[in-house]
């Protein structure tokens, strides 16, 4: 580490360099760049980005005009001379627990302009001192307390940064004020914000910005159609994804989902061992500019590392957000011979399209263990298209407020997208309806329409029916209900705006699942990335400042929600091992531990498993296994619907219990909702970006 005097000497040399470069910038950018290059060479500064950041900070302090693309350090001018607060060189030193990969860089960002104001594009890169030690110096106000975080990134060929890992502590690091010339330079440990409070590293993967994720999923049954089992046996094969073109920012990882070992990691040299029933997900990160040009090979090796065959694929084959690739695995010895055919599902995750996110804070992993077991109102105050239903229809603002009045901590609601892209609240994928004026006496007189095929204005006019014990019942249409809070199909934005902040929300994204025996819950033609972005846009804009969590039965939707944003937590919602419904085709949905493994692989907050999984003797042990992986588990289902069951799930260690009829089954001793606290709600104010 250099001394303060040495750093000052470097800064003065840098100042001279900046003056020369900036004075020429108005007449000859080439000349200015030449001076920059000469100064870089003379001062031994390896990274141009760091030079520009420091140069821009100096330029701002000296009232010199600098390029707007760089941090300007305007906070240096904000301190009044009478306060004695002067610009001071502050040194940042950080030590890693493990060395970075050759292409990876370390950077920091913070809440002042000289540190980039939490923006990825304006971060401050650090210089590598040795394998584990990094350092940089930034000119900052000495009298101001500054918040900051470190992160690891790579740069693609276009100069765009991808966030590999970042510090995700609920509260950022603090750089405290110091007297002029007495500012010390402690050594930070990457991932450990406060060693006195917590020695456990808290680092997570970033979110998408200028890159996309392609996942190739070995997560089902009967994926291979083999021509000759003696030549190619899918029960004894090792799989590897090999990029044909190598480029900056292209990164291939995999997850083989086993309890406690499901994290994404680099591929072995001869591929990942795979057999029927395994869940192996290849996770490919690649720059958006490179996507349609990138080709891959799926290589298949024997257990003794002999190449058996391969199949080619390219990103241009990914015709939508998800789909099924039909690949032919050709023999390595006889290229004209097809060893097997493979039906390979994929999902493509694009960046959130509406606004850039930042490093300010994250709630994606924020669920303190000090919180009690929470009570969650299922669809508000419970299902209503059944016998002995509550007064308020499910998934209406009135139902949510009823749960709130009975001290529910959160409510669960279901979100669909209409044909014109409006997120609305309703449980089923479709509804029973009939033309105006038609007399309905029997169920077979009703029509069934899907919400995704109807625009919102038409949806509000539709007649709504249900069939209970063979009898047909009609309910007021949205436009026919004079009480606005009782109207069916409220928009998501209306719910977010009208519910009190002290009522938490579990936003379930509805996406139809394929069944094990064939067929799907419903048809879906809306693009999955578009669907996720529309819901995220409204939640980020109107749902911040309150406890809020996403959930979905679709594992890929959970992956999308996880990597598109860094603000809200995501749960994988599963029906598990049940006798009530047919299993889904995705093996990740089949049992609780498969869901836990998938949550670990893609850093979800946890799972929302079906109550039927926890009626046996090992229920408490299963929940403990989830907690051991740092996950929450919100239990739901009809088996929760009694006071005794609510108490039971609390006793075995559920994070929360989601049940119908808060008015009937809420614990009698409960006097208020947990989040009904101004101090607690203040913790969620950092979610808001607008």
Image: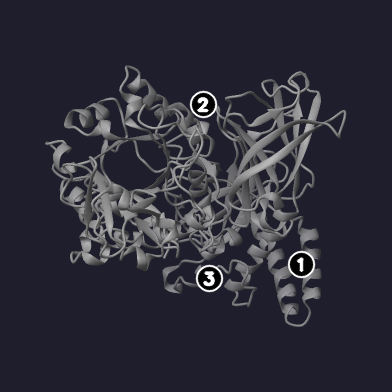
Compared with 675, 17 (above or below) is below
Label 3 close to label 1 by CB (< 8 Å): no
Task: Classify mark 1: helix, strand or loop.
Answer: helix
**Is 54 on the left or on the right of 639, as rendered?**
right
Q: Secondary structure at mark 2?
A: loop
> Which coloring applies here?
one colour
| Residue that numbered label 2 is attached to | 260
Q: Give the mark, 1 or 2, whose residue is nearer the N terminus.
A: 1
Of callouts 2 and 3, which one flags the residue occurring earlier in the amino acid sequence?
A: 3
Quadrant of res 336: top right
Q: Quadrant of residue 686?
A: bottom left
The residue that label 3 is drawn on is 74
Report the number of discs.
3
What residue sits 40% from the left and 29% below the top? 627
Q: Is residue 100 visible?
A: no
Q: Which mark is residue 614?
A: none
Q: Which residue is mark 1?
A: 36
Residue occupying the far bottom of the picture: 27
Q: CA distance from mark 1 to mark 2?
A: 50 Å
Residue nearer the viewer, 473 or 429 = 473
The residue under the point 74% across, 73% down is 21
At label 3, counting other C-alpha atoms closer than 10 Å, the crowd grade (few under 14, some 14-19, many 20 or more) is some
Asked if the residue under mark 3 is in contact with the one under mark 2, i.e. CB atoms within 8 Å, the reply is no
Helix, strand or loop status at disc 3: helix
2 vs 3, front mark: 2
Q: Position of residue 528 (x, y in %)?
A: 52, 52
Quote the CA–CA distance across marks 3 and 1: 22 Å
Percent position (x, y) of residue 93? 59, 47
Q: In which quadrant will I find the C terminus?
A: bottom left
Residue 54 visible in this rendered orientation of the protein: yes
């Amino acid at each position: 580490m250099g001394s303060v005097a040495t750093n000052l000497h470097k800064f003065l040399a840098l100042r001279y360099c900046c003056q020369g470069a900036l004075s020429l910038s108005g007449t000859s950018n080439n000349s200015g760049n030449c001076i920059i290059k000469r100064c870089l060479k003379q001062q031994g500064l390896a990274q141009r980005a760091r030079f520009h950041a420091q140069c821009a900070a100096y330029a701002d302090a000296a009232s010199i005009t600098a390029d707007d693309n760089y941090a300007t350090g305007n906070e240096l001018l904000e301190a009044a001379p009478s306060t004695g607060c002067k610009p001071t060189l502050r040194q940042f030193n950080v030590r890693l627990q493990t060395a970075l990969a050759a292409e990876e860089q370390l950077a920091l960002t913070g809440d002042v302009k000289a540190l980039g104001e939490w923006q990825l594009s304006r971060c401050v890169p650090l210089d590598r001192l040795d394998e584990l030690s990094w350092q940089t110096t930034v000119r900052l106000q000495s009298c101001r307390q500054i918040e900051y975080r470190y992160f690891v990134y790579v740069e693609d060929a276009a100069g765009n940064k991808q966030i590999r890992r970042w510090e995700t502590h609920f509260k950022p690091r603090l750089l405290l004020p110091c007297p002029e010339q007495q500012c010390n330079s402690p050594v930070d440990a990457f991932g450990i914000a406060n060693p006195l409070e917590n020695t456990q590293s808290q680092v997570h993967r970033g979110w998408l910005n200028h890159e996309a994720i392609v996942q190739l999923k070995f997560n089902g049954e009967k994926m291979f159609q083999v021509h000759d089992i003696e030549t190619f046996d899918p029960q004894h094969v090792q799989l590897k994804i090999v990029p044909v073109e190598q480029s900056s920012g292209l990164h291939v990882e995999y997850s083989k989902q086993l309890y406690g070992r499901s994290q994404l990691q680099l591929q072995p040299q001869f591929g990942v061992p795979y057999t029927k029933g395994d869940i192996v997900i290849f996770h490919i990160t690649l720059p958006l500019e490179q996507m349609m040009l990138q080709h891959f090979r799926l290589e298949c090796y024997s257990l003794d590392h002999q190449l058996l065959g391969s199949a080619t694929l390219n990103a241009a084959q990914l015709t939508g957000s998800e789909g099924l690739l039909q690949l032919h695995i050709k023999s390595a010895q006889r290229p004209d011979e097809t060893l097997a055919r493979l039906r390979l599902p994929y999902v493509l995750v694009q960046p959130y399209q509406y606004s850039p996110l930042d490093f300010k804070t994250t709630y994606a992993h924020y669920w303190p263990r000090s919180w009690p077991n929470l009570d969650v109102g299922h669809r508000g105050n419970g299902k209503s298209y059944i016998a002995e239903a509550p007064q308020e229809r499910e998934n209406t603002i009135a139902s949510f407020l009823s749960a709130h009045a009975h001290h529910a901590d959160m409510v669960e609601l279901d979100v669909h997208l209409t044909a014109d892209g409006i997120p609305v609240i309703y449980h089923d994928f479709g509804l029973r309806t009939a033309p105006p004026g038609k007399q309905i006496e029997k169920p077979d007189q009703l029509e069934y329409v899907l919400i995704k095929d109807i625009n919102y204005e038409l949806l509000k006019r539709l007649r709504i029916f249900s069939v209970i014990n063979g009898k047909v019942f009609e309910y007021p249409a949205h436009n026919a209900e004079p009480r606005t809070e009782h109207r069916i199909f409220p928009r998501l934005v209306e719910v977010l705006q009208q519910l009190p902040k002290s009522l938490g929300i579990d936003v379930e994204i509805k996406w139809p699942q394929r069944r094990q025996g064939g067929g799907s819950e419903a048809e879906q033609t809306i693009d999955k990335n578009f669907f996720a972005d529309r819901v995220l846009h409204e939640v980020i804009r109107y749902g911040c400042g309150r406890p809020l969590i996403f959930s979905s039965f679709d594992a890929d939707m959970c992956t999308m929600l996880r990597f598109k944003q860094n603000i809200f937590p995501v749960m994988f919602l599963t029906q598990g091992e049940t006798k009530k419904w047919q299993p889904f085709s995705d093996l990740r949905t089949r049992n609780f531990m498969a869901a836990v493994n998938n949550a670990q692989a893609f850093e979800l907050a946890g799972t929302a498993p079906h109550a039927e999984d926890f009626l046996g003797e090992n229920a408490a042990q299963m929940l403990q296994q989830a907690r051991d992986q740092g996950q929450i588990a919100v239990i739901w289902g009809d088996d929760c619907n009694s006071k005794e069951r609510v108490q039971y799930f609390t006793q075995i260690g559920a994070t929360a219990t989601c049940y119908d009829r808060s008015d009937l089954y809420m614990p009698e001793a409960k006097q208020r909702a947990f989040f009904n606290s101004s101090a607690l709600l203040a913790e969620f104010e950092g979610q808001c970006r607008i």
